[in-house]
Image: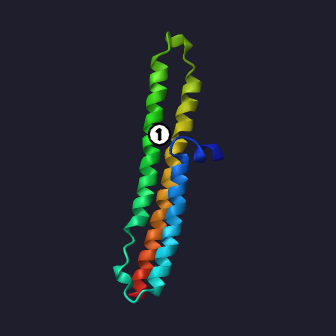
Amino acid sequence: MELEYIKSGITGVPVLLIGLLTICISLFKMIRIYRSESPEKISLDIIWLLGLLAFLLRLLEQIIRIGSLCKAVSQVSSPENIDVLLVFKGIGDIAYYSLTGFIVLIVSLILWGSLKGIRKQRS
């Protein structure tokens, strides 16, 4: 996967910032768990919610791009002018957009599960 797919699009940089924010919040929550007398009161839901937000943003962008591709194909004057390989290349490129959001979601779920286990162990 090329780097341009990760940072491109209207949600590329915000999704990367959400991923970075998720890691920072996880570190902050881990420090709070280790310093707290009652770690079971520390909420961890924001971690997986940020991952879900990143995934949904990229999925929304993918849907918008597929709609734009379909609209562009439908506006072609004659079917002979449509290059099928170019259309499928566009669909293939669009598929990468939700992948980056999915990666952020998986990382956030791993962090959430790890912190939940640490919190349970410290309680």
* Residue 66: percent from left, percent from top: 46, 32
Mark 1 = which residue?
62
In the current view of this chain or complex, which residue is farthest to the right? 2
* Residue 88: percent from left, percent from top: 55, 29
Task: Give the camera-side residue of 66 and 24.
Answer: 24
Could you tell me if residue 2 is visible in this image?
no
* Residue 17: percent from left, percent from top: 54, 56
In the current view of this chain or complex, which residue is farthest to the left? 41
Residue sitting at 43 percent across and 30 percent down? 67
Dot 1 crowding, Cα within 10 Å, few <14, some 14–19, many 20+: many
Vertical side of 114 occupied by 66: above or below: above
Vertical side of 9 occupied by 102: above or below: below
Q: Secondary structure at mark 1?
A: helix
Residue sitting at 48 percent across and 34 percent down? 65
Of the 4 image quadrants, the one containing the C terminus is bottom left
Residue 84: quarter of image = top right
Residue 2: quarter of image = top right
Vertical side of 88 occupied by 33: above or below: below
Q: Amino acid at mark 1?
A: Gln
Could you tell me if residue 24 is visible in this image?
yes
Residue sitting at 50 percent across and 45 percent down? 11
* Residue 58: percent from left, percent from top: 47, 46
Residue sitting at 50 percent across and 14 percent down? 76
Colour pattern: rainbow
Vertical side of 40 occupied by 2: above or below: above
The mark tally for this picture is: 1
Left or right: 85, with 56 as reference point: right
